[in-house]
Image (cartoon, rainbow, N blue to C red):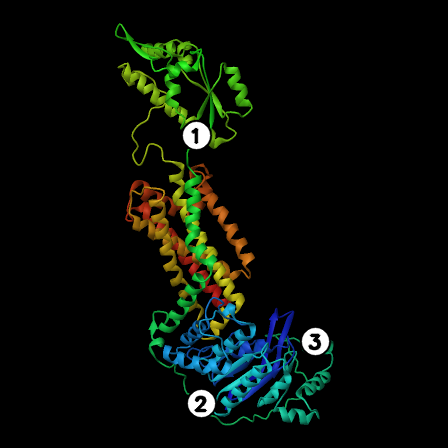
Amino acid sequence: MAAVEVRNGYKYYGSKKNPKIVLNQLNMNVMRGSIYGLLGASGCGKTTLLSCIVGQRNLNGGEVTVLGVKPGQPGSGVPGSRVGFMPQEIALVEEMTVKETLFYFGRIYGLTDDRIREKFKILKDLLQLPSAGQMIKQCSGGQQRRLSFACAMIHDPELLILDEPTVGLDPMLREKIWDFLVETTRNSKLAVIITTHYIEEAKQANYIGLMRNGVLLAEDTPTNIMIKFGTQSIEDAFLILSQRQGNEDQLNQIMSHGKSQTLPAAAPLPTEVIDVHEPTAEKPPLPYVEPQNDNGKKIFFTTKGRLKAMMTKNFVQLFRQPSGIIFMMLFPIIQLSCFYMAIGKTPKNLELGVYSGEVSSYAECFDESLQTIYTVNDTCRFNKLSCRYIQALGDDIATRKYYPSEEAAYADARKANTVGYIYFSHNFSASVYEYIEDSIYASDGAIDNSEIVVHIDMTDQQVGYFMQRKLRDTFSTFMNTVVRECNVSAALVKLPVQFQDPIYGSTDIEFQQYCAPGVVMTMVFFLATLMTAAVFISERMDGIWDRTLLAGVSATEMLWGHLLTQLIIMALQSFEVIVYIGIVFDTYNNGDTTTLIGLLTLTAFCGMLFGLFISVFCKSHTEANFVATGAFYPMIILCGLLWPLESMPAFLQDLVMVLPFTIPSISARNVIEKGWSITHEKVYNGFLVMAGWTIIFFVLCLMGIRRKA
């Protein structure tokens, strides 16, 4: 009975007009209970042939059947538990231990934990595996290959495919593995396909296929091949066959001759194939039924064992990498600490020049006996009010530097020794008195001289705006105090700025509090993006992704396994962020904390899917970082975090409203500042926008993963 049949197998890469032919009308039979040695130089098509047999790739022409079914059919078990596959690369998770690795593959294949323990003991003795608690990255190359072989054998497959299994192993262990394979196939229906560079060791195989340039040159028993070509070794027979096939130019000319309407043409090559596997009448194979146990119970989209295996692997990968723990738990803390300590705080160590024409010595301003407001004949009189304002400034706003003249203050400001200066006229107090007494009927000179003249260096606009605001606020407070002490109605006095009680929040929302929701959301989003992209690209580059797919796990199952793992992590991160900024930086929240945690978790979940989307279409970490960085800065600039949306052109305002952060940031700010609940339209629309992007990224990820799978 044939375990594997390939008929007229044809495979090419590239376009139909300019194909690179890998398999050229290849025919192959592998019988149950036998070892089939597939020999050939690197690049001859062996790995591609094996990938077509296990259902990882599809032929462009011809057909292949494995264990009586076409690979990839639902319920066929191929790829899946009927096949064991050991790839050329190690394809194991370096952060896992030897025992965890075998349990991972055992659970994926549907074995119970007790059965895995039994197989672990057997394989450990047979393959001289390292101790159960040793991590993969601490194993030697030979130990890793032996463990990789054990993972392919853990579930007792019906077909075992080994791609260069003995590379890097000592001769004694290679002989032991071959003895095991020979004994196992002799006493069971196990079929083994093994590729090797050690051509002579393939003499122990029941059948040998000699392959070159996508063609099976010969297929027979080792003895018959040596007899037919009159050689004492398989290697010499392979050399003779290669010489008969002509040089590379002739082969390429033959393979590219002619064109077909449906496929690039593939002319048959001369061959010495001796097929000893005569077709025999076989009973139709019975439908394959997966063994049922607790690990095989369905849980929504997968089985209990597979879900446990995938989530265990994902958590191990994260928590056993110091950089992963730092990136996952400490990085948000570091980022938020930098933001709250560096952004929105009062500027320190600023020097402000002061010149008052009312005083001859500034020591007068700090004389405790100085009276700035007194009453004469029931009328207010003012004396050196500039001193009153100088005292009101305080060192918390700026360090005051006094000058004997306006020219000296101006000269120092020009040299950038101060951020600017303020100037009081020589009749400032008298002008303020006249202004209060006569109001709008005061003389022009009184109105002009009752003002504080302020000159600020605006080359540093943030510092300049800060100083202007502080001087304005101090002057407003100063004037209110003067009016109150003189028992003059404030309505009769035209103050520079008239403040009223705000509808929501404080009189002036600090820049830090305004920016905080957007900063936190973008940080959580792109942290999840980078983490996910790094994990998926590493798995694909290390071969773990493909090996798991060949074990029968669907791309959708793998995606959901990662989503559930990351969802737990992101929920913890969101809770950590909210608690940290609330306790350490005393950030107020007038709304529901649960709503904020939910919005942040959804944001992180969306970021994770964006990272997965990037990893599907990027081949390297560098390329993924370029894409993530390229997306990060436009989103930060356009989401209203740095500047009001209302300042943008109308068409751009409409565009940025659909970006992932714009409306969700506004929703978070509405919860924090206004105390609105999730039932309010301007809160739940942030959830809707983020959920919409989550669905979009999820669908794109599924499409990309299935296309690549």
Which residue position is annotated with label 1? 466
- The residue lying toward the viewer, choosing from 372 and 6, is 372
Around disc 1, counting alpha carbons within 10 Å, would you say few (fewer than 14), some (14 to 19), or many (20 or more)?
Answer: some
Residue at image x 33%, y 51%? 597
Q: Nearer the viewer, mark 1 or mark 2?
A: 1
Q: Circle 3 — which element?
A: helix
Tag of residue 201: none
Around disc 3, counting alpha carbons within 10 Å, would you say few (fewer than 14), some (14 to 19), or many (20 or more)?
Answer: few
Look at the picture and state if 380 lies above or below 254. Answer: above
Look at the picture and state if 495 lies above or below 302. Answer: above
Residue at image x 59%, y 93%? 276
Which residue position is annotated with label 2? 284
Find the distance from the CA under tag 3 to the CA under tag 1: 76 Å
- The residue lying toward the viewer, choosing from 470 and 707, is 470
- The residue lying toward the viewer, choosing from 22 and 156, is 156
Quadrant housing residue 446: top left
Q: Amino acid at mark 3?
A: Asn
Which residue position is annotated with label 3? 252
* Coordinates of residue 153 in the picture (x, y in percent): 47, 81
Residue 497 lies left or right of residue 280; in this view the side is left
The mark nearer the N terminus, 3 or 2, is: 3
Q: Is residue 71 visible?
A: no
* Coordinates of residue 121 in the picture (x, y in percent): 43, 81
Q: Amino acid at mark 1?
A: Phe
Q: Is residue 191 visible?
A: yes
Find the distance from the CA under tag 1 to the CA under tag 2: 85 Å
Q: Circle 2 — which element?
A: loop
The mark nearer the N terminus, 3 or 1, is: 3
Residue 42 lies left or right of residue 559; in this view the side is right
